[in-house]
Image (cartoon, grey):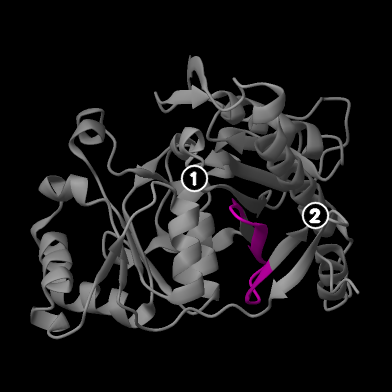
Amino acid sequence: MIGTTITQFLIEEQKRFPSATGDLTSVINDIVTACKTIAAAMRYGAIADDEILGIAGTENVQGEEQKNLDIIANRLFLKCTESGGHIAAMASEEMESIYQMSAEDPKGRYLLLYDPVDGSSNLDENATFGTIFSILKRPDGATGQPDVAEFLQPGVQQICAGYAIYGPSCMVVITMGNGVNGFTLDPLVGEFVLTHPGISIKPTSTRLYANIGWAHEWSDGLRGYIRDRMNCTGEFKGVYADLRWSRCMVADVHRVLMSGGVYVSTANKKLRSENHIGVTRVLYEVNPLALIVEQAGGTAVSWGRRSLEEEVNNLHQRGPVIMGSSADVEIFIEKYH
């Protein structure tokens, strides 16, 4: 017998708020449909068309090579979410500016931000990748077509955040500000079923997720933190460190949620030379995953401060982040930052 589906779960959550209209539930259901469609494209597309996972020959606004699935997934997100009438506009890591709904269509009160394929460099290696999404409300009094400024809200203003992870099984993990819950796709019935209720991050762990290839660009404090963890010295004397890195933020943060640990992403020389201040995209990656981590009992900081309170000035702004097991992140803030 099938367990609680994500739709049933959302309806029960909606009942907790007598004034709820059901619009947010509809938006999340549309996102879930997009994720199921992306999962199908990934699993069967390579058989039908051996180019679906390859390089598309184009670059996104970030200056990165796009995979065909990057483009396909972005289109799927637009198609699955634009016709519901509950979203006013969308922003994607793959699009330079915001995507407006038709002027003739009714304007919803929500703004959707998403990274359709996180970790696309893993695709040709048959490794894990994901999708990240964030939902904001339009500012009070906003009417007409939304502008970019409406999207530049600090992460603390998010009303929902989540991700899909496409691995041995497909999962969607979401928070609406009341804890974190995980749903696994049952391929026999095509439904996401609640399998990980009330996810909680261990306060401390031996696991560390960092791209050590950028160690020469780290601050002295971060370098000392990583060194002491790897060498079992300083604040981590006698504590074994398990260093891992998958090239997919969703995959690494998911492992943090499941088993504890600390995820580290910081600046690098190339991005700094292009006037960027970090690697991860604030609106599409840092903010949604930071909200999930916090709601699961963890900590997320940027520049030594709470990530969700950081100011956002650009639709494609980047920044550093350290997130995960609260006790381990607090040691970084107190002793190494």
Q: Position of residue 76 (x, y in %)?
A: 73, 33
What residue is at 72 percent from the left and 24 percent from the top? 48
Direction from residue 160 to residue 103 in the image, left or right: right
Q: How many marks?
A: 2
Residue 166 part of the magenta-drawn span: yes
Label 2 Cα crowd, 10 Å radius (few <14 / some 14-19 / many 20+): few
Residue 49 seen by the camera? yes
Residue 337 seen by the camera? no
Determine which quarter of the picture holds residue 172.
bottom right
The secondary element bearing badge 1 is classed as loop
Query: Residue 187, labelled with which disc?
Result: 2
Q: Which residue is mark 1?
A: 127
Residue 177 part of the magenta-drawn span: yes
Towards the viewer: 222 or 72: 72
Determine which quarter of the picture holds residue 336.
bottom left
**Rendered position, 260 above or below 130:** below
Amino acid type indicated by mark 2: Pro
Give, as a single range, the part of the protein colored magenta. Answer: 164-182
